[in-house]
Structures are given as C-alpha cells and as structure tokens.
Image: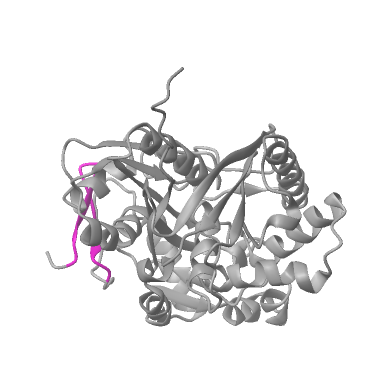
Amino acid sequence: MNTNQTTSPAVGIDDIAFATGANRIDLAELAGRFGVEPAKYYVGLGQSEMSVPAADEDIVTMAAAAAAPIIERHGSDRLRTVLFATESGIDQSKSAGVYVHRLLGLPQAVRVVELKQACYSATAALQFAAALVARNPEETVLVIASDVARYELHSNAEPTQGAGAVAMLVAADPAILELETATGVYTQDVMDFWRPNHSATAIVDGKLSISAYQDAIEGAWADYRSRGGADFSEVDHFCYHQPFTKMAIKAHRHLAKSLGSERTQEELDAQIEPTTGYNRRIGNSYTASVYLALLALLDGDDDLTGRRIAFLSYGSGAVAECFSGIVRPGYRSALRSDANRAQLDARTVVDDARYLQLLEDAASADVHDSDRPRETSAPFRFAGVVGDRRQYEPTSA
C-alpha cells in the first residue's frame, strides 16, 4: 500500500477580468425605432443597454484588453496554455488567440487554441484548463471568452445583441473560486440557433431556443447530481448563460419547479438577481455571458466567502454543462470592482443613427483591403486588413 499519497491541490479561478465595446446604446433608442414601449426591453427582456464595439474593435481587441490586467498582475512565467472561446470567429483556420498572444507579448513556449460550440465553449475551456493545472500545478492556463452578438436588423432578436470578453487565469490554490470536481453535461442536436458560412448573422428559432435551453439545463443538472454534485438546496447562487437576463430568471424558476424545490419565487430570484447587473448593461456576449454573471456576483455587496455557486452553461445546437465552485477566503483582494464599474460608465453613449452606422462599418471590416479609423481608447485596436491579413496593434502605436 502506498502510504505517501498527497492530497491534490485545489484548482480554480485565480483571477478574472473583462472588457467590452467602447460604445453603449440605451434600448429605449431601439424601442423608438420599433414603435414599442421601452418597458418591453427593460422589463420583458431584463435589458437596459447593450455594448457596441467601435469601428476598430473586435473579439481580438476585447480579448486582449480583458487579459492584459491579468498578465500585468501575474506575469507569464508559469503560463503554458491560452484557450480562446468564441462563436464570432474571424478566421476559418487561425485561432484568434494567436493574435492575442502577440499583443500581450506572451512567450513562444505557450500553446494556443480556439474552441467553438455556440455560447458554451468557454466552459469547456475552463474544464480543460482545470485538468491541465491538476496534471501540473506549477502551470497556469489563460481562458478567454470573447464575442460580438449580431442579429438581423429590425428583427425581434436585435435588442439582444451585445459585445464583451472575459479572461480568467486558472491555477492551483486559486484566489477567487475553487472548482468542485462534479460536472454534468448534456448534448442534443437541435437547430435552435446557428450561423452558416454564408451569413454574417445568426439564424434563430426563438421559441425552440427557449425550450432547448430549458431541456439542456435540466439534463445537465440531472447528470451533475448523478455524479455527486450538490443538492439544489445546498447552492447559494446560480450563474446561468444570459442571452438576456430575464431568460436566466425564467430558467432558474423552471429548474426549481422541475426539482420540486420549496423555495419561494422571491428566494429563487434572490439567487439570480445579483448575477444580472453586468449582462443587463452589456447585452448578449455569447461565450462570456455566464462569466460576466459570475463577475457581477463577485463585485456585489454580499460577502460570498465559503458560498457555493452553481454554473449552468448553455450553447445552442445544443450543449450544456453544470458545475459548481466554492468562493475562497480573501477573494475580494483579487477583484477589480471599482475599475469594472468605471469601464461600463466610461462607454460613449450613441443614438440609433450612430449605432446603425457602426453596424454598417462592422459589416465592411473583412474586405480584402480596408483601414479602420482610430476610435477606441482601449489598449488594443484592429487597424484593418492588408492583403487578407488582419492587422492589430496597441492603441499607442
């Protein structure tokens, strides 16, 4: 018998940061064009604003901006892997993370790969990262989720657009969140949301998407419980994928009802509401949204030390995963709460006309040769395309 067994170190999120587009539009502007009351969006969707990237911003610039504070704080000596999750891919072959690797000045001895499965893939990246760190606790992994959500203009889905990126450093003995080992997964081939190669915007079956989301959440939760996951009553807060924040609230009520929970609606909503603050103002950020939910919760007023958070991650098509983590003592010292709120407040307010112009500019960003005007004040910018080669640079260049 081996009497020298050692306990595996805790693995989880050691640092987390986000970035978003330089502009924001109040959904009252869209309500005016659609001829509806703003309450349809403020209350019905649970959304107040959405981020709109500047003409020289995209998933790469947001990803690099989100990751830069983490690299500045921790350095890159232990970093061995960058996992870039997105469904807004900019190239059919090359990982967007390779551009980020250069912009951040990372060592060459780092693997970089892009992952895709609608809004779910950042969770796959997080689980892969945890496995790599568990194998070698001396290594760290940078997980980045970055997306720009785009739908057809004047469609019912248009008010659920947005843009954002979240970067997470996964490490042993994490400062913020220790991941528990149980996970539950679910996959089913469903055509609720997809974007074929010929289209710049997604195709959505809204009614099917909601039912597919709920089915997947139920399935992932059941698998999580069957593999030793915590009981519903043992979870303090839930972070859901938030294509719009009201969807997370409805999904949580649906899950609770399916499990026969005796918690009141007010108690259920209290488990969700603190996770909605950033998504409400940013809009749909696809792969990043469930982790923006986590960030909003962490930046809130409650002391979460020792609390259990369950994550219900969903990606249309459809894949879902349920997992949980415990908030670590002293986690607040690793946060950037004031800077996060300041970033949202600093966005430039645009009206509907300017917003429509920005969308038109974005649609022309991938032609063979094009320069992008200097607009963003973020650390990095998309300078344009020269000979089918995308150009990225620091804004100070």
Magenta segment range? Answer: 378-395
| x and y, in percent, of residue 315 in the image | 60, 44
Confirm whether residue 199 shows in the render.
Answer: no
> From the viewer's perspective, is residue 171 above or below residue 240?
above
Residue shown at the point (43%, 63%) measured from the top left: 360
Q: Is residue 12 left or right of residue 212?
A: left
Q: Quadrant of residue 42?
A: bottom right
Confirm whether residue 307 shows in the render.
Answer: yes
Residue shown at the point (61%, 39%) measured from the top left: 183
Q: Is residue 391 magenta?
A: yes
| x and y, in percent, of residue 89 in the image | 41, 44
| x and y, in percent, of residue 180 in the image | 55, 45
Q: Is residue 261 left or right of residue 119?
A: right
Residue shown at the point (42%, 66%) measured from the top left: 331
Name the dominant secondary structure of the magenta segment.
Answer: strand
| x and y, in percent, of residue 77 in the image | 18, 46
